[in-house]
Image (tube, rainbow, N blue to C red):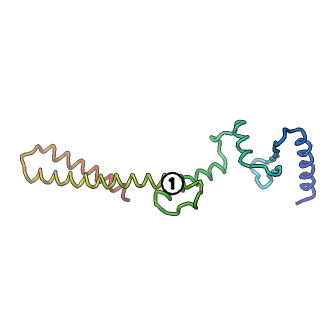
Amino acid sequence: MSAILQRFHQVANDALVKVSEHCLPGAKITLVIYTPGKPEEDIVLKDQGLDDNEVVSSLRRRGLSIDGDNAYKRDLCDSIIGALAFGAQNTNPPPTDHWGQRFWDIGREERAVCEELIAALKVTRENLRACQATIHLCGGFDPAYVNDAQAAMKVADAALAKALS
């Protein structure tokens, strides 16, 4: 650490000690100095025992929005999307008691529902095909029904092909 930066840390720390003498008992102090676009120059000075999550909560109470764009939120959202996808694939579950387990479970449950729907559609499609074949062989039925059944089977086939690809 350069002498200038070391001196800055000392002066800032001394100032924080003086400020803390005027705070309510139990209050914690943090100082964040950043240069936009230069994260390598960030400086964070924290009280002992400071809970970083409480700092974020304090900023939220003072107007920090989840709607803004930042790397932390992008990484968090990417992690959630990944957990959902891995759950749907039933692969790579998170470690025991990990916060991502909830999202992995959601992905797994959604895929299970999808698999149930696919199975039901397959059975329905096969029954429709059997009915259509019977009608065709027996003759005397309204040709519109046969045409509608064939069109419905094409819709089912397309949905099945999409779901199974």
Q: How many marks?
A: 1
Q: Locate the C terminus by quadrant.
A: bottom left
In the rendered image, residue 100, in percent from the top left (x then y), is placed at 57, 54
Would you say 59 lies left or right of 45 here? left
Q: Is residue 87 visible?
A: yes
Picture quarter containing residue 29? top right
List x then y, in percent, for residue 77: 59, 50
Q: Residues within 10 Å of mark 1 (few under 14, many from 20)?
A: many
Q: Where does the N terminus fall, quadrant-wise?
A: bottom right
Report the amino acid beneath label 1.
Answer: Leu
Q: Nearer the viewer, residue 130 or 105?
A: 105
Q: Relative to 143, is 76 on the left or the right? A: right
* Residue bearing the label numbered 1: 84
- Confirm whether residue 43 shows in the render: no
Residue drawn 79% across the image and 48% down it: 35
- Is 54 in front, or is 38? 54
- Secondary structure, mark 1, is helix
Which of the pair 98/134 is nearer the observer?
Answer: 98
Of all residues, the one furthest to the front in this rendering is 25
Residue 124 location (% of width, % of height): 25, 51
Which residue is rendered at x = 23% and y = 55% of the image? Answer: 126
In front: 85, or 146?
A: 85
Q: Position of residue 31 (x, y in %)?
A: 82, 46
Residue at the image position 6 percent from the left and 46 percent from the top? 140
